[in-house]
Image (tube, grey):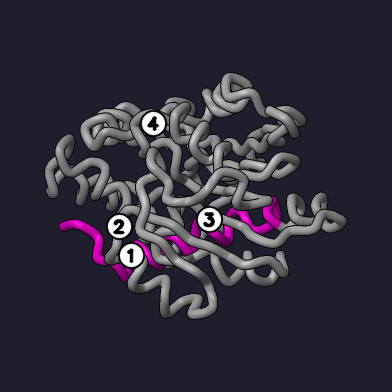
Amino acid sequence: MPLSREEWHQRFKLQARWTEALRLYFFELLKTNDITAVLDMGCGTGALLPDLQSLSSGVIWGADIELEHLDLARTVCPECRLAGANVHHLPFSDSSFEVVLCHYFLMWVGDPGHALAEMRRVAKPGGFVVAFAEPDYGGRIDYPPEFFSLRDDQISGLLEQGADPRMGRKLKGLFQSQGFSNIESGVYQGRWSSDESPEEINSEWKILAEDLAGTLTIKELGVLRKHDQAARMKGTRLIYVPTFYAWGKVDKGK
């Protein structure tokens, strides 16, 4: 069963918590800059918007192609300005924002190079374009052995949805290809532990059910979840999906 808007919002909030420290670090780097406007491209239900308000005194904009998600974002951040928009045809003038950012987004856009070019177009000279999180399911690690096939199953499911499951490893090259300078990129540190909350575990399985709907049956998913519960009880369950980030500066005069 597809996730509801509210279930997506809970997932987006969980993802926002995972990347909170990096956003704080990035905006600390820019604390001497005069930031008048920030665009969260692919803002979804607005999970990042309150955090961006706390990190910047500028006007916070959110844009997304899913209008139903924006309806919820309006309640999450009433002061923010929102726009229904396709990243390949942004309804903003050139040089409108000091920071244009996205979060778990480029893997879904079909042509990430063109998306970055359009995000670069609406960023001001001297400003930054940021991809705070792009996973790479090609590097997914699962243990114990009952889960060894999960990586390939999820890759197949994501490809069927039109996503790029290996976006993370391509991120730095994409920024270089679009002419950004001062590029910084890396991968989030993995937590090799089994201390996920019930909320995190349930969220992970809802996403897996969404991704694997065309690959595994409901019965097969149920069997996997029972293995997951047993492995967690033993302390042997391990899940790691490398998640990359990158940002680059828009040079003046280019």
Amino acid type at mark 1 = His
- Residue in the image at 53% along x and 41% along y: 119
Please name the residue that numbered disc 2 is placed on.
Answer: 66
Q: Quadrant of residue 213?
A: top left
Q: Which mark is residue 165?
A: 4
Please name the residue that numbered disc 3 is placed on.
Answer: 40
Magenta residues, as a range? Answer: 1-23
Rendered location of residue 252, percent (x, y): 75, 34
For label 4, count other residues whose C-alpha is less than 10 Å away and answer few (under 14), some (14-19) or many (20+): many
Rendered location of residue 198, percent (x, y): 43, 66
Whichever of labels 2 and 4 marks the residue nearer the N terminus, that label is: 2
- Residue in the image at 54% along x and 35% along y: 242
Q: Is residue 49 among what the camera can see? A: yes
Please name the residue that numbered disc 1 is placed on.
Answer: 69
- Residue in the image at 71% along x and 44% along y: 127
- Would residue 108 appear left or right of 248 to someone viewing this image? left
